[in-house]
Image (spheres, rainbow, N blue to C red):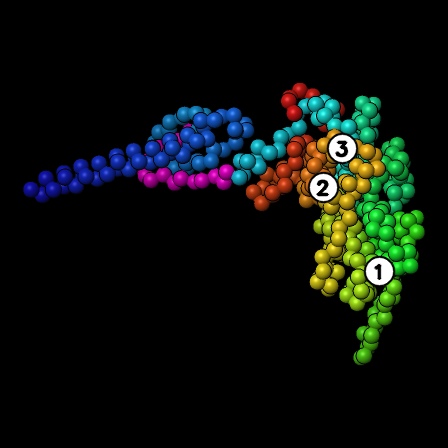
């Protein structure tokens, strides 16, 4: 009788395992089938929405290009986020440069990380720009770096051996002055500048009064009992850009103007977290200076540089071009690519600057360019696949 009881238990255990395997097999098949039934929605080497991982499989069965492993032990079913696959599908590695080039009239290039790094020209840039000009393409160079004026950037291009005229260059320093002109900023009001010479020169060319800049980098505050810091009540705008002479005096002066002068504007040239001062490493960008004023004033700035649409609208009006006929080329997702997307342009990410493939493919990244490639000189060699 004891033997019969043991035999019955073994049979029940076997039947339970067999039933469990059947249920898991059906779950695997139903999980994979929604993806495999439409192979056109998958990119090469992409994963299905559901994947199965076993502890140690005895045998495997392949179907629809995917492998399921069957085990006597329970399988662990892992769900892959469908939005990750959707994001992967949104971006294509550039394979046919000619088709992209032929589809637009104008290329807007970021400078830092695309044309140069620090004071070093990126390989293949001169030949690429010459090729695009030979095809009749309009080239525009847009940078969030406000330390130089357009004229000064023209000299940098010349020093690097690039033939670029001033009318093709748009720096955020120029954008700040152009914005003030666009709103008819009163000429009897002043602009306090937390930034460098580029902003001062563009404000001067536009006919605006200004104070601050590098000169205030030498000023210090002696905190004595009862000390009250004075400021100019005629300041109607505070412009904040990248500033290597940033100090506490500038923070306090700008804060007083924004908080105490009625209607005072708070303008940022950009909010870039990092920048390329040299080709050896990344350096804290203009966003760190802007952040200090955001913290002290509890106000958000009006940003005139990328990814704001102000410069895109200005360029489209100036050259009389449709935004759909523009391709924005940059190395930053949150400024360059978003700038192009906000303006309704095609976008190409290059991996020669800030952004890496891992950053592009990260689940946390929500900004996907139309195409990506390693550097702009790939325009010279890529010409086979469909764009």
Identify the magenta region: 67-82
| In this view, the mark in front (3 or 2) | 3
Residue at 80 percent across and 64 percent down: it is 262
Residue at 79 percent across and 37 percent down: it is 316
Residue 88 lies, with reference to residue 384, above or below; the image says: below
Mark 3 and mark 2: Cα distance apart in space: 15 Å
Residue 35 lies, with reference to residue 271, above or below; the image says: above
Q: Position of residue 339 (x, y in %)?
A: 72, 41
Q: Quadrant of the C terminus?
A: top right
| In this view, the mark in front (2 or 1) | 1
Q: Nearer the viewer, residue 70 or 179?
A: 179
| Residue 17 placement, left or right of 8 | right
Residue at mark 2: 339
- Asked if residue 78 lies in the magenta stretch, the reply is yes
Q: Position of residue 25 (x, y in %)?
A: 34, 33
Residue at mark 3: 322
Mark 2 and mark 1: Cα distance apart in space: 28 Å
Q: Position of residue 107 (x, y in %)?
A: 77, 32
Q: Which mark is on residue 236?
A: 1
Q: Which mark is on residue 73?
A: none
- Asked if residue 70 lies in the magenta stretch, the reply is yes
Mark 3 and mark 1: Cα distance apart in space: 34 Å
Q: Choose the circle earlier in sequence order: 2 or 1.
A: 1
Q: Quadrant of the N terminus?
A: top left
């Amino acid at each position: 009788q004891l033997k019969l009881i043991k035999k019955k238990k073994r049979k029940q255990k076997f039947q339970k395992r067999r039933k469990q395997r059947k249920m898991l097999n059906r779950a695997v098949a139903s999980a994979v089938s929604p993806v495999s039934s439409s192979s056109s929605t998958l990119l090469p080497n992409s994963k299905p929405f559901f994947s199965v991982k076993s502890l140690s499989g005895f045998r495997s069965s392949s179907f629809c290009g995917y492998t399921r492993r069957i085990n006597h032990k329970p399988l662990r079913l892992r769900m892959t986020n469908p939005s990750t696959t959707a994001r992967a599908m949104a971006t294509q590695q550039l394979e046919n440069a000619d088709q992209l080039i032929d589809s637009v009239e104008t290329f807007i290039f970021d400078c830092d990380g695309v044309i140069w790094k620090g004071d070093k020209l990126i390989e293949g840039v001169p030949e690429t720009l010459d090729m695009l000009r030979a095809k009749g393409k309009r080239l525009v160079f847009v940078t969030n770096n406000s330390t130089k004026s357009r004229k000064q950037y023209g000299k940098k291009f010349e020093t690097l051996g690039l033939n670029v005229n001033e009318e093709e260059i748009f720096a955020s320093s120029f954008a700040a002055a152009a914005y003030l002109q666009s709103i008819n900023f009163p000429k009897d009001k002043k602009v306090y500048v937390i930034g460098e010479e580029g902003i001062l020169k563009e404000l001067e060319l536009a006919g605006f009064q200004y104070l601050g800049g590098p000169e205030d980098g030498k000023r210090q505050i002696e905190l004595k009992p009862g000390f009250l810091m004075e400021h100019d009540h005629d300041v109607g705008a505070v412009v904040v850009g990248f500033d290597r002479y940033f100090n506490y005096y500038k923070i306090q002066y700008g804060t007083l103007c924004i908080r105490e002068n009625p209607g005072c504007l708070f303008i940022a040239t950009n909010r870039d977290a990092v920048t390329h001062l040299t080709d050896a490493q990344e350096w804290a960008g203009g966003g760190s200076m802007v952040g200090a004023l955001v913290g002290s004033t509890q106000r958000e700035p009006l940003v005139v540089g990328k990814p704001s649409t102000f410069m895109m609208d200005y360029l489209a009006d100036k050259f009389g071009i449709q935004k759909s006929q523009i391709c924005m080329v940059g190395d930053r997702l949150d400024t360059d690519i978003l700038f192009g997307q906000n303006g309704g342009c095609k976008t190409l990410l290059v991996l020669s600057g800030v952004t890496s493939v891992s950053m592009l493919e990260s689940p946390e990244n929500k900004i996907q360019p139309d195409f990506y490639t390693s550097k702009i000189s790939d325009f010279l060699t890529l010409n086979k696949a469909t764009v």
